[in-house]
Image (cartoon, rainbow, N blue to C red):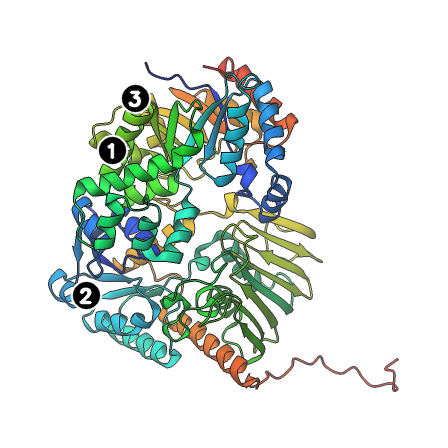
């Protein structure tokens, strides 16, 4: 059965020193959240406010959060994770350290068939490349073992790199593996929603979950805000909106009211670190979208 | 139908792949790529719709590109760029441009002579906040600038690592060529090539064959003195962070990738939207939206500028070979200064204020 996403999802950028407005703010956040209990405190506020889905990067620190939730099922009976992978910096650093080929080898299981094949330097068959992709996905999913992960996203840097290269088949491989192995809905984060949708449809994937910037001022809505609206109006996409506040450029009430009027918007993902901001976003979504849960 | 540009991305390392993706997504590009046979070429050849050449000469002769994007290790830039220019092909080359600045000048001459578009990948020149800084400097917003700090920090080399071209100084590796080149190129953009370089220190922290941190003092003809401080072994930064601050007679100016802040002592006539005291402009308002986003508008807009200038739709934008040669030359000055401990270049004549009519020893 199709998983119905909640209307309001909680994001994780604020925990990892990612702030699109100011490096100073980003650093202050990195300092505040270097201890996982500080992250958990904020997640508790969100959870207790009825926001039960945490959309998060497969960052090492998230493994600690996953561990806490796994060990406290009575406290978090409805907690959902939407993992977003891969954590790109990990791979980028590995490429710098080991080279492109070495990096792939580095992440393959020791002594496994694929590592042997890679070491042999022989040309890889298509099924081998698919096999490598699946192993990488499985490695990223390990930290969520035993937890509820009804949607699994591909991160935007990766989605968009593949889109630009014209490597649509990799999106298909991800899609199929997430469905078959994790019984979850695959999702794609992108900064280029209209192109992403076109490529997914060409790969035979209909009505996909796509998370992209959707905001009143059209900030980082590549492909043009009109194309986003058209795709949503046609019901071709299960849209998740991020950057609804355009990094603070739009006042919250105005921002939420605007997105709530879009056709077929399924969810909003937002990041906040204070109780006041979490509660005010929840209340705005409840007011304009009729509640925060599915 | 709009005209399309036959363009090939050469070298499929980290930067090359990113350029390949940007070019591949461009509506006016007919894309090809080229790299030596290997894992990446193998996987891509089977999965992407673009032709991937394994031999650069063959690409130039048989593939007949109108433009190339060179993203190979730095020591290969000069010969590959020259071969392309000689075939009448427009060139975008990754930074640093050439390891020998005289060669960079020659290639700038050659590109000019042939009337070809030539651009180098200093992407900070396409960041809204630095473009705003340039506009404010040129408008004289903070008066006569005397004091400049140019910094870049990031987590590239955090432990001793395997030898590669990136860690070999003679091949264009190291923090100076790779990291410091960016703030240096911005300084060149604002103030020109330094007249004098002193106080340069290139230290190794983890790398065996090359530098991981750079200090230098650069003096410019216009009277500005800049201190450069760069370190690529700094884990506290999530990714590369470049920032420039300046103090002038009418205030202070600061920019990084996210924002441009300016403090004005007095309002500047003709400078709309800026008042006395602090003024802040964020990326959101300074950003020029791009047709495709991969890892920042600056990379997209840089490539879009190249493609459209090759098609004759727009004038050449960004860093051209001549500008990049100035940066290569600045790098050479720093290297020489660090090696010999002697000042390189001549100290510019200080801008001295007209002496007041002398009334007495204490001027009162």
As helix, strand or loop, the secondary structure at mark 3 comes to: loop
Question: Mark 3 Cα within 10 Å, few/some/many (few <14, many 20+)?
Answer: few
Q: Chain of mark 2?
A: B
The residue indicated by pointer 3 is A234
| Disc ID at residue B345 | none
**Lateral position of residue B48 relative to residue B320, left or right:** left
**Lateral position of residue B126 relative to residue A35, left or right:** left
In the rendered image, residue B271, in percent from the top left (x then y), is placed at 59, 55
Above or below, B43 relative to B60: above
Specify whether residue B40 is in view. no
Q: Indicate which disc, 1 or 3, sits on the residue closer to the N terminus.
A: 1
The residue indicated by pointer 2 is B56
Residue found at x 68% / y 51% = B278
Residue found at x 54% / y 86% = B340
The residue indicated by pointer 1 is A172
User: Which residue is most to the front?
Assistant: A111
Q: Chain of mark 3?
A: A
Q: Are marks 1 and 2 in contact (CB under 8 Å)?
A: no
As helix, strand or loop, the secondary structure at mark 1 comes to: helix
Q: In front of the other: label 1 or label 2?
A: 1
Residue found at x 49% / y 40% = A60
In the rendered image, residue B68, in percent from the top left (x then y), is placed at 25, 62
Residue found at x 51% / y 67% = B212
Q: In front of the other: label 2 or label 3?
A: 2
Front-most of residues A182 and A235? A182
Q: Are marks 2 and 3 on the same chain?
A: no
Specify whether residue B279 is in view. yes
């Amino acid at each position: 059965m199709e998983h119905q996403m909640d209307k309001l999802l909680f994001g994780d950028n604020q925990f990892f020193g990612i702030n699109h407005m100011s490096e100073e703010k980003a650093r202050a956040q990195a300092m505040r959240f270097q201890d996982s209990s500080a992250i958990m405190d904020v997640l508790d506020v969100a959870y207790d406010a009825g926001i039960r889905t945490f959309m998060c990067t497969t960052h090492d620190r998230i493994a600690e959060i996953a561990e806490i939730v796994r060990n406290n099922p009575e406290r978090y009976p409805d907690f959902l994770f939407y993992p977003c992978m891969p954590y790109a910096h990990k791979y980028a650093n590995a490429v710098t350290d080991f080279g492109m080929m070495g990096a792939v080898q580095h992440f393959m299981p020791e002594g496994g068939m694929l590592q042997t094949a890679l070491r042999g330097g022989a040309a890889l068959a298509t099924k081998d490349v698919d096999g490598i992709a699946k192993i990488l996905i499985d490695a990223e999913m390990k930290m969520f073992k035993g937890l509820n992960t009804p949607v699994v996203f591909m991160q935007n840097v990766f989605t968009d790199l593949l889109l630009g290269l014209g490597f649509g088949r990799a999106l298909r491989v991800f899609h199929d593996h997430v469905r078959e192995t994790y019984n979850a809905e695959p999702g794609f984060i992108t900064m280029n929603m209209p192109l992403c949708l076109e490529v997914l449809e060409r790969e035979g994937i209909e009505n996909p979950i796509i998370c992209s910037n959707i905001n009143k001022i059209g900030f980082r809505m590549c492909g043009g805000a009109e194309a986003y609206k058209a795709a949503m109006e046609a019901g071709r996409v299960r849209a998740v909106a991020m950057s609804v506040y355009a990094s603070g450029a739009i006042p919250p009430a105005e921002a939420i009211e605007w997105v709530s009027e879009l056709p077929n918007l399924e969810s909003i993902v937002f990041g906040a670190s204070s109780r006041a901001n979490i509660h005010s976003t929840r209340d705005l979504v409840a007011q304009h979208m009729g509640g925060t849960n599915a | 139908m709009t005209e399309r540009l036959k363009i090939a991305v050469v070298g499929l390392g980290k930067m090359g792949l990113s350029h390949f993706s940007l070019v591949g997504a461009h509506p006016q590009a007919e894309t090809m790529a080229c790299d030596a046979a290997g894992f990446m070429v193998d996987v891509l050849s089977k999965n992407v719709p673009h032709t991937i050449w394994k031999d650069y000469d063959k690409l130039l002769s048989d593939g007949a590109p109108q433009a190339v994007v060179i993203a190979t290790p730095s020591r290969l830039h000069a010969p590959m760029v020259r071969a392309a220019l000689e075939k009448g092909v427009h060139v975008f080359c990754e930074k640093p441009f050439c390891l020998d600045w005289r060669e960079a000048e020659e290639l700038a001459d050659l590109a000019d002579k042939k009337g070809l578009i030539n651009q180098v990948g200093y992407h900070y020149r396409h960041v809204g906040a630095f473009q705003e800084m340039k506009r404010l400097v040129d408008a004289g917003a903070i008066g006569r600038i005397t004091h400049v700090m140019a910094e870049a920090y990031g987590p590239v080399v955090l432990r001793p690592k395997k030898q590669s071209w990136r860690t070999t100084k003679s091949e264009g590796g190291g923090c100076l060529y790779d990291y410091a080149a960016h703030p240096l190129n911005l300084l060149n953009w604002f103030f020109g090539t330094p007249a004098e370089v002193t106080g340069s220190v290139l230290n190794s922290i983890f790398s065996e064959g090359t530098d991981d941190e750079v200090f230098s003092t650069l003096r410019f003809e216009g009277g500005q003195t800049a201190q450069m401080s760069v370190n690529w072994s700094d884990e506290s930064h999530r990714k590369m962070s470049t920032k420039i601050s300046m103090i002038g007679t009418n205030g202070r100016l600061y920019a990084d990738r996210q924002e441009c802040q300016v403090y004005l002592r007095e309002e500047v006539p003709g400078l709309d939207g800026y008042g006395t005291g602090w003024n802040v402009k964020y990326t959101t308002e300074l950003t020029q939206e791009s047709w495709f986003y991969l890892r920042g508008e600056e990379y997209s807009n840089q490539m879009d500028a190249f493609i459209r200038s090759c098609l004759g739709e727009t004038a050449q934008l960004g860093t051209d070979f001549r500008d990049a040669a100035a940066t290569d030359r600045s790098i050479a000055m720093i290297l020489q200064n660090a090696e010999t401990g002697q000042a390189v270049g001549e100290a510019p004549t200080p801008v001295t204020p007209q002496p007041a009519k002398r009334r007495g020893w204490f001027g009162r």
